[in-house]
Amino acid sequence: MGVETKTAVVLVSGGLDSATVLAIAREAGHQCIALSFDYGQRHRIELDAARQVAEQGGAIDHSVLTLPIGELGGSALTDLNLDVPEATEAASDEIPVTYVPARNTIFLSMALGLAETTGATDIFIGANAVDYSGYPDCRPVFIDAFERLANVATRAGVEGDGFHIHAPLIDLSKAEIIQRGVELSVDYALTISCYNPSPEGLACGVCDSCYLRAKGFEEAGITDPTLYRT
């Protein structure tokens, strides 16, 4: 008898982290359902990248759900009255204005609902706690807490096999993530990381996400395929 193939829900934003996670999930033998969100983000062009990443990455299905969380405000990624700050190498304990309130909690909740209705027991997310912007919902303590929640708040968690939330990039540097993706033949030219891209999809080159991406490619010794405005 052959090995049973398991289905997984993978959060795919169109960035390099989620593209790498999709490849990791596929390598682990999962049939992957890609899930993306239009939540009012100013960098909505990432959804075009997400569609390409899902297709190239071998997802068996890809859903893009519309969520009004941008209407809550409080983030430069959803409020055009707030400026996306330029990156700084100075260490700071403050959570940046690009943090979207409760975003990963909401995203994982939707992924959990999709997993329960499709029979998937595994959910993958590209959260990272090393080279990241200091968001509280990208830390191991959050991932662990959500997994516990998933297994007490759902029928599948209580009566079925339960859920596992995978964050395989959580302890990797951006350079290590890129190196892992290259090993898995991820096409990073399809991805976009910029928080404030032009309407044509050109990266600004100065936001925190652009800085971390460029730094990661440089440290990995791999050419960054990103197209910048300047």
Image (tube, rainbow, N blue to C red):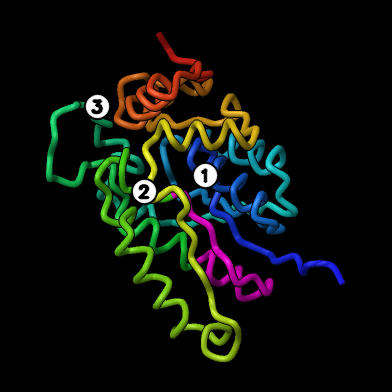
- Left or right: where 115 falls relative to 68: right
Q: Earlier in the sequence, mark 1 or mark 2?
A: 1
Q: Is residue 76 above or below residue 187?
A: below
Residue holding disc 3: 87
State the CA–CA distance, disc 3 to disc 1: 21 Å
Confirm whether the magenta stretch covers residue 125.
yes
Residue farthest toward the bottom in the current orientation of the protein: 159
Residue 84: quadrant of the picture: top left
Which amino acid type is shown beneath numbered disc 1? Ser
State the quadrant of the C terminus.
top left
Residue beneath the point at 60% across and 72% down: 121
Residue beneath the point at 52% across and 51% down: 37
Residue farthest toward the right in the current orientation of the protein: 1
- Left or right: where 230 falls relative to 199: left
Q: Is residue 54 above or below residue 107?
A: above
Residue beneath the point at 46% across and 76% down: 150
Name the one closer to the observer, 73 or 227: 227
Residue beneath the point at 50% across and 36% down: 16
Name the one closer to the observer, 155 or 167: 167
Confirm whether the magenta stretch covers residue 63.
no
Residue holding disc 1: 18
State the CA–CA distance, disc 2 to disc 3: 22 Å
Disc 2 is placed on an element classified as loop
Residue 175: quadrant of the picture: top left
Residue holding disc 2: 171
Which amino acid type is shown beneath numbered disc 2? Asp
Residue range highlighted in magenta: 110-126
Relative image position of residue 91 (x, y in whole percent): 14, 35
Which amino acid type is shown beneath numbered disc 3? Ala
